[in-house]
Amino acid sequence: MAHKAGFVSIIGKPNAGKSTLMNQLVGEKMAIITPKAQTTRHRILGIVNEENYQIVFSDTPGIIKPAYKLQENMMSFVDSSLVDADILIFVTDINEKQDEEDVLEKLKKTTAKVLVVINKIDESQNNLIEEKIIYWKEKLNPEGIVGVSALHDYNLQPIMSFILENLPEHPAYYEKDELTDRSQRFFVSEMIREKIFKFYKKEIPYSTEIIVTAFKEDKKIIKISAEIIVERDSQKNIIIGAGGIMLKKVGTYAREDMETFLQKKVFLEMFVKVIPDWRNRDNYLKNFGYSE
Ligand SMILES: Nc1nc2c(ncn2[C@@H]2O[C@H](COP(=O)(O)OP(=O)(O)OP(=O)(O)O)[C@@H](O)[C@H]2O)c(=O)[nH]1
């Protein structure tokens, strides 16, 4: 059998469940998942390798109208993942009330094969699923439509079948033992960012960036230093919390995740730093990896 390989991009509105779906399909935790919208900032590759095929998934930031430069750059990651894609998986929440026209505009232009995934069917009735399938068929006439629950790993097999049917014949793009294009440092910083999204409210998570400044592996322990960047002094105080209690909580949970991920003991130290308005400053966005 000829070898197949290709790029599969997962797109949709914030919070539709794109990261949850990608992690299920790849079988590893690649992308951080939180109940807040716009958790994913980068395009993250997750690679599935088998003898006869290689699927390169990209999870992408949810599609929004950019309000600041960071978001503009996030949207350019989405556009580039559309250009590369052989297959597009459009994830839509079955109870979605937001306008999805901006996503549809992008989908209409593509030459990739499109699969509409109606997610979170665990939160709905059968007749609504039928209705939505008809709706998407008329609206977009995609090559495939399926109702799933990414969270509960329900009905994901048809997605894999669709991908394998539509994947082009091609040699592997990446080494067959690679799971992602991202470094351990990247995942470590995402683990801290995930805790910030979980433990803080309002604008704090959106104003925060994590930089891993040192990653030193010894025989028995990995020493990791990270900076938590925020935009204002008041945010710095909130991140640290009274007597350092909040920062300690972030550190404890993040370290546990890191130890599971790296399979080694971790010593984690974190510093909070203020960089006014970093989300709108090109040089910082570039330094932090938000331009292509
Ligand atoms: N009930 C239910 N919840 C789900 C399902 N899939 C995902 N979720 C939840 O929806 C929320 C958003 O999931 P994510 O996977 O982070 O969504 P996303 O589309 O990657 O979000 P952005 O990063 O903002 O673009 C999380 O709280 C998930 O647990 C599902 O099938 N059913």
Image (spheres, rainbow, N blue to C red):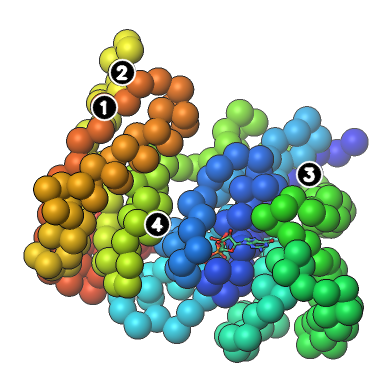
Residue that label 1 marks:
267
* Image position of 133 with respect to 279: above or below: below
Crowd rating for badge 3 (residues with CA inside 10 Å; few <14, some 14–19, many 20+): many
> Which of the two discs, 1 and 2, labels the residue nearer the N terminus?
2
Q: Position of residue 123 (x, y in %)?
A: 72, 69
Residue that label 2 marks:
221
Residue that label 3 marks:
4
Identify which residue is drawn at 83% across, 80% down.
Answer: 128
Mark 3 or 1: the one toward you: 1
Quadrant location of ligand 1? bottom right
Closer to the camera in the image, 242 or 48: 242
Q: Position of residue 192 (x, y in %)?
A: 34, 46
* Image position of 96 with respect to 30: above or below: below
Q: Is mark 4 within 8 Å of ligand 1?
A: no
Q: Is mark 3 within 8 Å of ligand 1?
A: no
The amino acid type found where label 2 is placed reads Ile
Decide if residue 174 is on the left or right side of residue 35.
right
